[in-house]
Image (spheres, helix red, strand yellow):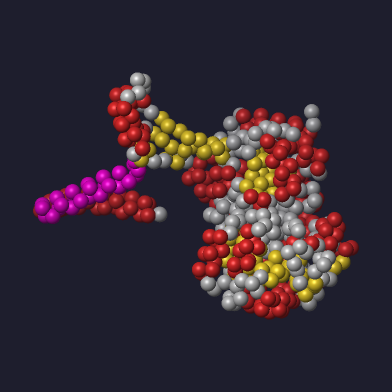
Amino acid sequence: MSREQLVVQRARKSFQTGRTKPLEFRIHQLKSLLRFISERRSDIADAVKKDLGKSEHGTELFETLGLEGEIKLAVEKLAEWAAPRPVEKNLLTISDEVYVQPEPLGVVLIIGAWNYPWAVTLQPLVGAIAAGNAAIIKPSEVSSHSAKVMEELLPQYLDKDLYPVVTGGVPETQELLRQRFDHIFYTGNSTVGKLVMEAAARHLTPVTLELGGKSPCYIDKNCDITIACRRITWGKFVNCGQTCIAPDYILCEPSIQSRVVEEINKNVKEFYTDNPKTFEDYGRIINQRHFKRVMALMEGSTVAVGGDNDESQCYIAPTVLKDVTRDSRVMKEEIFGPLLPIITVSGVDEAIQFINEREKPLVVYVFSHDNKLIKRVIAETSSGALLANDCLVHFTVSALPFGGVGNSGMGCYHGRHSFNQLSHLRSCLIKQLKMEGVNSMRYPPHTAKKLGWARFFLLKQVDVRRLRRMALLTMFAGLAAFVVQNPNRCQVINPVLCFFRTKLSISIFSYKL
């Protein structure tokens, strides 16, 4: 029996004991994960520095800060997320208890990525723990220093049997994928995503695929180009361009191309100095294989900004490419590096057509003062997300589902969406063994009269909460009328009236929310 098979077997056996069911256990594990991040902050920063050349402050900003927020949110909201969720009834089930009960899926496999080795590996783990699952954590072998720290230190904080870390390369990952899981959560590229989905299909295992793609960025010629380029420069070159939601290419009219190049060049110097190679907050390409891949993408395009590189350090300067065509090599695959090509289009019509002729991206970016133009791009394109007049920041909003569509992925996570994604939302209906006369309409023989009653009882939806509010409103109106007609008894009625007034206000307020 392989190491991977033993680990999965141990996790499943531990899950089947029911230890993960109590919310107290889940909260304890989440708090332990938070303590891990707090106490091992320097170990995490050192590992990311060795892997990606990222500064300590950069690691905190882009790796651990959001992770801490996700954990605290899950701890605060877990009781609410895990509670039964009442649903609307029909007349046939009006006296029954009808609700959705979230329950754990079982054993989840989380395969992380190397570009943000902590954030994109541990954020799904937060959802897995909150939902009451066991989870096998497989960090990327490409970010080897982070994987080693995770393997050595995380088991000191979390339950070793329920949340083991498995390291290794392709053979170890393939062996894990041969095992049966209840859900697989993969972050990476679409090529490997297809292999993960193929392996999952053998066991009918559902998957969440957080992939990528070429996210376009359209700049309207009438927008504030200075601010637009400042935000695009930040979003593109953070983490040396190795961000799945980074703007992959710019679409703009020929009349503003020179201005866009000028503004981006100015911002590169402001953010990273005249020599980004020596600047602490500008990272490196993950390894030489990816360095050569990114460098090869520049073939056939003109360098307008940057272009400096050093293979020995895996360094590529922030680079803008012009004279890029639809058939240029840089437009054939996701860049995942600090290259920003500019494609000229005649306007928003051609930009929308250009986007729709390609695979659905993870994000569409649009910069414009015109709200109608932004709404049009939303209406006429499809992507995992759309962000207007900024870059990346939608990732920080836990209430927004983060995920792709089509070639950019399936499923989503963050906040409550992580909990739902890694839970089974179980339909529950509890009926009493009474009122059998009402049920007679569904028993044979089936007649036209029974069909008429069934149509009435089954198709008429009933909002029980609304009925309760209406009942409170009726009661309040009756008490108010009584007070008006019997002013001498107000001293007795007022406390009761105030109570129902408060209940009614809370009910109406909750309904509006």
Determine the residue positioned at 67% across, 32% down.
203
Q: Quadrant of the C terminus?
A: bottom left
Instruction: State which quadrant residue 428 falls in.
Output: top left
State the image coordinates of residue 89 (x, y, percent, origin top left): 37, 38
Q: Is residue 295 left or right of residue 154?
A: right
Instruction: State which quadrant residue 157 falls in.
Output: top right
Q: Residue furthest right?
A: 312
**Magenta-drawn segment:** 462-487
Q: Quadrant of the N terminus?
A: top right
State the image coordinates of residue 82 (x, y, percent, origin top left): 50, 41
State the image coordinates of residue 387 (x, y, percent, origin top left): 58, 63
State the image coordinates of residue 366 (x, y, percent, origin top left): 60, 67
Q: Is residue 345 left or right of residue 5?
A: left
Q: Nearer the viewer, residue 423 or 11?
A: 423
Q: Nearer the viewer, residue 485 or 235?
A: 235
Determine the residue positioned at 78% across, 77% down.
274
Determine the residue positioned at 60% across, 56% down.
383
- Majority secondary structure in the magenta region: helix
Query: Eyeballing the image, is 250 above or below 182?
Result: below
Q: Nearer the viewer, residue 394 or 72?
A: 394
Determine the residue positioned at 27% across, 47% down.
470
